[in-house]
Amino acid sequence: MSERFELATIGEIVAGNARAAEVFEEFGIDFCCGGRRSLAEACQRAAVDQGAVVRALEGVARPRPAQDGDDAARWPLDRLIDHIVEMHHGYVRRALPVIARRLERLEQSHGERHRELARVVNLFRELGIELTQHMMKEEQVLFPYIRELVELEQQGCEVHQSPFGTVENPIRMMEREHREMADALRTIRELTGGYDVPADGCITYELSMADLARFERDLHRHVHLENNVLFPAATALEQQRGEAEEA
Ligand SMILES: [Fe+2]
Ligand SMILES: [Fe+2]
C-alpha cells in the first residue's frame, strides 16, 4: 500500500484532500463517524479491495480548481464553525421541510406499490427532529464554548471551568448522535435500494431520491468536519489552555 495512506486514518485522509470523500463514498467507506479507522480496517469492514481504493485515492490526489470549503480543515476554528453553521446547518434547515413534504407526497401516490416508503417518511421525519435539536445544542452550547477557547488562546489567557466539565463530554454526546443519524440515513438508503428510482417512478420519485442522496452526502461532509477536524482541535486547545493555567 502507498505509504502516504498507510499511517493516516480515514478522517485524516479526507481532511488532507476533500476529494477523497468522493472516493470513500463510491466504495461505501464511512469517513465521518468511522473516521478514526485506518484505511486497511475501513476497507475490510466495507469488504472492498484496498488496492482499488488506494488507486482511486491517488487518482484524486492531482490538483483541481479549488472549491469553497475544500481547505476548511486548515482554517482557524472560529472560521470553521462559521462555515459549518452557514453551509451545513443552513442547508439542513432549508432542505428538511422541502424533502419531508416531497416524501409525504411520494408516499401518498406510490405507497401502495412501494410499501417501504412509509418507513422512509417516518425515519426521515424522526431524523429531522433529531438533527434540529442536535444543531441547536452545537450552536447554543458547544460552538460558543469552542469560540471562547479560541479567544482565550488569542489573549493568552487560562481556561475557565466549563459548565460541562471538559469539552470531551459534549463532544462524546455529539459523536454518538452523529452515529445514530448516519445509521438512520443508511437505513433509508438501504430501503430505497441506494436511492433507486423504480421503473414506475415519476418526477417526484426522481427528485426525492436525488434530494435524499444529496442530503446524505452533505451530512457526511458536515459530520467529517466536526468529528475529524473541529472536535480534535477543540480538545487539544482546551488541554493546552488547561496546561497554561497550571504553568
Ligand atoms: Fe453540526
Ligand atoms: Fe454535529
Image (tube, helix red, strand yellow):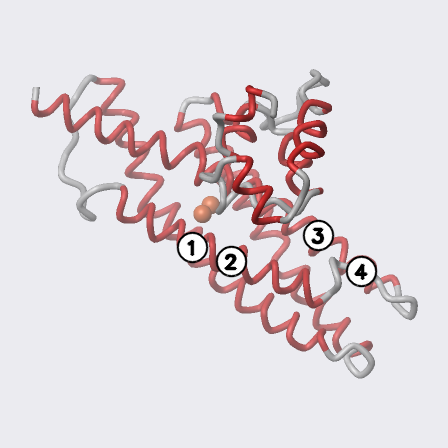
Locate residue 101, reporting x and y percent: 68, 67
The answer for how far apart the CA atoms under marks 3 and 4 are is 10 Å
> Are discs 2 and 3 less than 8 Å apart at CB?
no
In the image, farthest residue toward the bottom: 112
The answer for how far apart the CA atoms under marks 2 and 3 are is 14 Å
User: 34 above or below 157?
Assistant: below
Where is mark 3, residue-wise? Answer: 213
Please name the residue shown 44% across and 34% down the image.
81
Where is mark 2, residue-wise? Answer: 181
Quick check: is the Cβ at mark 1 less than 8 Å away from ligand 2?
A: yes
Where is mark 1, residue-wise? Answer: 134
The answer for how far apart the CA atoms under marks 4 and 1 are is 29 Å
Point out the tag, 4 or 2, that comes first from the N-terminus. Answer: 2
Mark 3: which secondary structure? helix
Please name the residue shown 34% across and 53% down the image.
173
Q: Is residue 27 found left or right of 109 in the rendered image?
A: left
Disc 4 marks a residue whose amino acid type is Asp
Q: Quadrant of the C terminus?
A: top left
Please name the residue shown 77% across and 79% down the image.
111
Quick check: is the Cβ at mark 2 less than 8 Å away from ligand 2?
A: no
> Are discs 3 and 4 less than 8 Å apart at CB?
no
Please name the residue shown 53% across and 68% down the image.
126
Q: Is residue 200 found left or right of 71 in the rendered image?
A: right
Mark 1: which secondary structure? helix
Q: Is residue 245 found left or right of 70 in the rendered image?
A: left
Single out the mark in the foreground, 4 or 1: 4
User: 76 above or below 42?
Assistant: above
